[in-house]
Amino acid sequence: MVRATLFAHLVSHLRNHAGRSNAGAAPGAGRSRGERRGVRLMRAFSFFVLLLVALPACAQKEIVTVTNWRVHAGDNPAWARPDFDDSHWAAISYGELNSFDYAAGTHWYRATFQVPVDFAGQELAVGMGPLEEVYDVYVDGVRVGRYGSWEPSPHAPFPRHLVFPLPPGLLKGPVGHIAIRQWRGATGLLWLTFGSSGYFTLRHPPEIGSKAAIEYREQLHPLAGAVQRIPWDLTDVLFLFAALICFVLFSTQRRRAEYLYLGAFSVLQGAPTLIGIALATNQAVMARSWGPVLIFSLPILADAFALLFLAALCPRFRRILQFGAIILTFFAVVAGYSLAEQSYAETLLWMYGSSWGLAVFELIAIWALLLDRSLGSLAIAFCLLLDAAGWSLYIVPSELRFSSVSAGPFRIDFPSVAGVIFVFVTLLVLYLRYRDEQARQAAIDQELAAARRMQEQLLAGSEKNPAGFAVDAVYRPAREVGGDFYRTVALEDGSLLVIVGDVSGKGLDAAMLVAVILGSLANETHRSPASLLAYLNRAVMGRTGGGFITACCARFYPDGRVVLANAGHILPYLPDQEVTLESGLPLGISADATYSETEMQVGGAVTFISDGVVEARDAKGELLGFERMAALTTKPAAEIADAAQRWGQEDDITVLSVTRTPALEPAVA
């Protein structure tokens, strides 16, 4: 009793030491906020480390650890009696009791222990470590505890460390008898959940002793296990932090799906521990639930996203790696279903199948990265090898296995560390590539800005308001530079030559072809509209790269006459209606193309547009269309362009309106 009391005081002192407040005249008074925070962190850290040191303090003479057990399948209440002869039962250790056979159904376990003399007159209890799933505990034939429920069918919350008090005077002889009646499923699925949370790290055989000592010991076991798992839990936190970085990078570069895949992989690697902690500490959730299935399936699904990520990095083997991702996704679903259905053999089959499948496809990815020969690809290939080597430690013979090692009070898991190294080295490589791409993009943006200024200068060569005419023009490219063009030239006879056109395609290639067209127009403006279109057709033949150019040309005379010719372009508009006009082939399709002219008398404005106006598309996919355009023809060019942009711009927008103005009479003196 004295030693148990001393241990109780030790635990109480450790708790008070870790949680001491700085209020009033506390020892931390006068320190800076940072110093006080550092002191609190050091105290908390010391508390958890001292837990491991203090844990053996309970192993006193009045605590008996029951280690040697016998097991028998079946269910018979007589097996709880202390006088039952179990000599013909199979002998096992307690570790085997936790993993024995993984056979579904009810098993009984029996053991004997020496009763210390100083147990007499004490308040005793039995301490049970986590044991799946439903079980009863008997001491000398008396049931002292039950976890879960046997009726109507066996079910229980997730296992945990428990204390069952013994009735006073139960242990009367020098030898005690303990029996455990246990039911569980075939797959040991609860170990997945509890193992991922760390509460199984310090599982232990049943212990019998003073109630106070047993209670403190059962509080320290899970805490000590959590301390051992701190490095492992830290790797899960790093996985989630890496996922956040990946998603931020993906939000800035939506076309780079590899960031999304790597982020999903990192989330699925870190999530099982969080789910396990939530389930293992919640008594309201039954063990037979979706939790273990998720914890089992998510890492396999994470491997599928890893293959999708590698497929994005290795274009040469993209289809093969994407096929591997589909296979692993199928394995994740089927393995989870097998686990839920408690099919032990099938669960192992799909689990090992996914592991070997991942290994094969990872080797393909490593080979593809090595063929790339860039420094970043070589670094990712090396980390991928390191990660594969880490997880392979789980499948080597147990006598050669060193997947984790102890480091003071902690335990370091090599596969998790290798996985974190892979993710962060890969992130570094992707970031460096992202930075290089940003630098290249900045250079391209500068070139495009220069091209846009050049294009604006070329279009500005038109005379906006020549004598006798009012010209209203607006040009709004869909990108930095576009493929629309227009030119107005006042001729010597007082007429005005207008040409509006559209190059198929967008971007820099279309803008370069626009420059060719405007250059060709520089000295060839004294032609009729039809002959000018024929001239441009010959000038661009062989330069369109398989595309074409639409154009509409018109010559406005001071007396109101207008002569028009069209090469496949959107027809011009009079107020509220389209102009009826014969249309020829677009430019650049046939060198023998000919174009006809139409002459008409016009009293109002003539509006020319590009197809970016009528083909503006809203969120529902509806086009602006010709009817709505006809209703806009009385508006200024800027308002027409604004309406098209609001509707939903998808292409370059050009609007040009020409109105004849009356000549001014000379003033009379």
Image (spheres, rainbow, N blue to C red):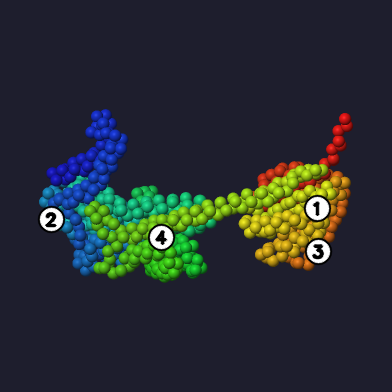
Q: Earlier in the sequence, mark 3 or mark 4?
A: 4
Q: Residue furthest left?
A: 117
Q: Nearer the viewer, residue 9 or 628?
A: 628
Residue shown at the point (24%, 39%) measured from the top left: 16
Tag 4 residue:
299
Tag 3 residue:
594
Residues packed near mark 3 inside 10 Å, few (<14), some (14 to 19) or many (20 plus): some
- Residue 554: give its label: 1
CB contact under 8 Å: marks 3 and 4: no
- Quadrant including the N terminus: top left
Tag 2 residue:
174
- Residue 18: give its label: none
- Name the mark nearer the viewer: 1 or 4: 1
Q: Secondary structure at mark 4?
A: helix
Residue 336 in view of the camera: no
Q: Secondary structure at mark 2?
A: loop
State left or right for residue 618 relative to residue 65. right
Residue 117 in view of the camera: yes
CB contact under 8 Å: marks 1 and 2: no
State left or right for residue 650 relative to residue 525. left
Residue 434 at x, y = what percent?
47, 55
Q: CA distance from mark 2 to mark 3?
A: 118 Å
Q: CA distance from mark 2 to mark 4?
A: 51 Å
Dot 4 amino acid type? Pro
Q: Earlier in the sequence, mark 1 or mark 3?
A: 1
Residue shown at the point (39%, 56%) measured from the top left: 424
CB contact under 8 Å: marks 1 and 4: no
